[in-house]
Amino acid sequence: MDFLATVAMIGMLFLGVTVLLAVQSIAFGRRAIFQAKAQIRAPGLLLAADLASVLLIGLGVVVLLLIPTLYWFIHGDYERYIWVIRGPQPFSQFGGGPYQFWLGVCLFVTGSGMIVSGLALRKWFWRCLDR
């Protein structure tokens, strides 16, 4: 199995786990919200925050997986590398080191920010339920 197929399988696994956790968070989150309903003013907002936190964490992991996937896609094969850098304007920049570096930094910051935001939303959700 080559590298791209492995990364695709890992990405699909993370997306599947994200969907599973989203469904689980809806089920458990609704139960926890309904148990503490007397204390909560906006139960729909808490449910949306719980679902958004799971989706942010899952998408953040997928964005972080894009960094090695993109590097492999560009540098995995010499013919593909030449094909990429001879493409139209945004793709022709992929061959340069500074462009790849800043693209990787931006993807890392975006993915990490999504994960941290999801964890913060999750912490806020459970703090609102006093658990």
Image (cartoon, grey):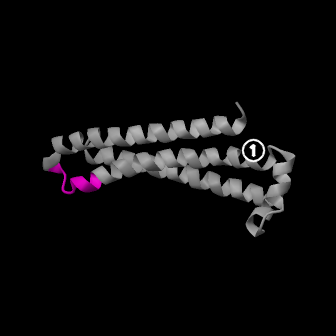
Q: Verify whether residue 14 appears in magenta.
A: no
Residue 123 or residue 111, whichever sits in front = 111
Residue that carries the numbered disc 1 in the rendered image:
72
Q: Secondary structure at mark 1?
A: helix
Q: Magenta stretch: dominant SS?
A: helix
- Residue 97 in view (yes/no): no
Spot occupied by residue 85 in the image (x, y as percentages of width and height): 82, 60
Residue 32 or residue 93, whichever sits in front = 93
Spot occupied by residue 50 in the image (x, y as percentages of width and height): 34, 48
Residue occupying the point 46% across, 37% down: 17
Which corner quadrant of the image does residue 23 belong to? top left
Q: Quadrant of the C terminus?
A: top left
Spot occupied by residue 70 in the image (x, y as percentages of width and height): 70, 49
With respect to residue 3, does 115 lie above or below?
Answer: below
Q: Which residue appears farthest toward the top when viewing the image?
A: 1
Spot occupied by residue 30 in the image (x, y as percentages of width and height): 24, 44
The segment highlighted magenta reads 39-46
Q: Amino acid at mark 1?
A: Trp
Decide: few, some or many residues near mark 1? Use Cα within 10 Å; few <14, some 14-19, many ≥20. Answer: some
Residue 6 or residue 40, whichever sits in front = 6
- Residue 59 in view (yes/no): yes
Q: Which residue appears farthest toward the bottom when viewing the image?
A: 89
Q: Quadrant of the N terminus?
A: top right
Q: Is residue 111 left or right of residue 131?
A: right
Residue occupying the point 28% across, 56% down: 45
Q: Is residue 4 left or right of residue 80?
A: left
With respect to residue 41, does 4 lie above or below?
Answer: above
With respect to residue 94, does 75 lie above or below?
Answer: above
